[in-house]
Image (cartoon, rainbow, N blue to C red):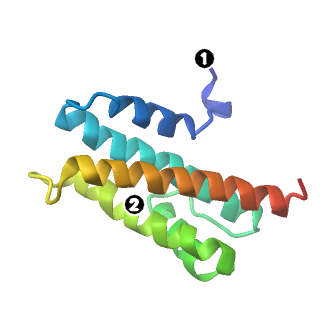
Amino acid sequence: MSSSSDFEWSEYLSFAKTLVDDPDAEESALRSAISRAYYAAFHGAKALVLIMGKHVPSTGDAHGKVWHLCRNECGIAVRKIGNSGKNLKDDRTKADYDNPFPENLRKKTESALISADYIVSESRRIWGLKAGK
């Protein structure tokens, strides 16, 4: 088990995928999967914008700021991360607060996992380019 100082945020995405492995997964598992996938994506994108020299507040405003920076201030290669992240943030909010869920929850969960996977992997790829790896 890792300590909180070296937690690998992408583990949330792996965990989210296990929550939906069962085709009969409960609504709570699907909603939780969207939320966990979002946080994996958020922290991946946040690491990217920090490595690009951008400031991210340490408050709840960080979420909107990260996606804004990706869409508007980090270049064309990062814009799609920002757009996907903004949409995923909206889905996470619905999963956490809307009752009933306003869409097909299974399909939305699958879409959220795909988006989060893209954001995490693309953030790492660009981060590696910026770091000269």
- Residue 76, given in percent of the width and then of the height, sits at 66, 81
* Amino acid at pointer 1: Met
Q: Is residue 98 visible?
A: yes
On screen, 25 above or below 62?
Answer: above
Local secondary structure at mark 1: loop
Residue sitting at x 56%, y 77%:
71
Q: Is residue 2 left or right of residue 128?
A: left
The residue carrying mark 1 is 1
Q: Nearer the viewer, mark 1 or mark 2?
A: 2
Q: Is residue 64 visible?
A: no
Local secondary structure at mark 2: helix
> Callout 1: few (<14), some (14-19), or many (20+) C-alpha neighbours within 10 Å?
few
> Callout 2: few (<14), some (14-19), or many (20+) C-alpha neighbours within 10 Å?
many
* Amino acid at pointer 2: Leu
- Residue 64, given in percent of the width and then of the height, sits at 46, 68
Residue sitting at x 27%, y 40%:
30
Q: CA distance from mark 1 to mark 2?
A: 28 Å
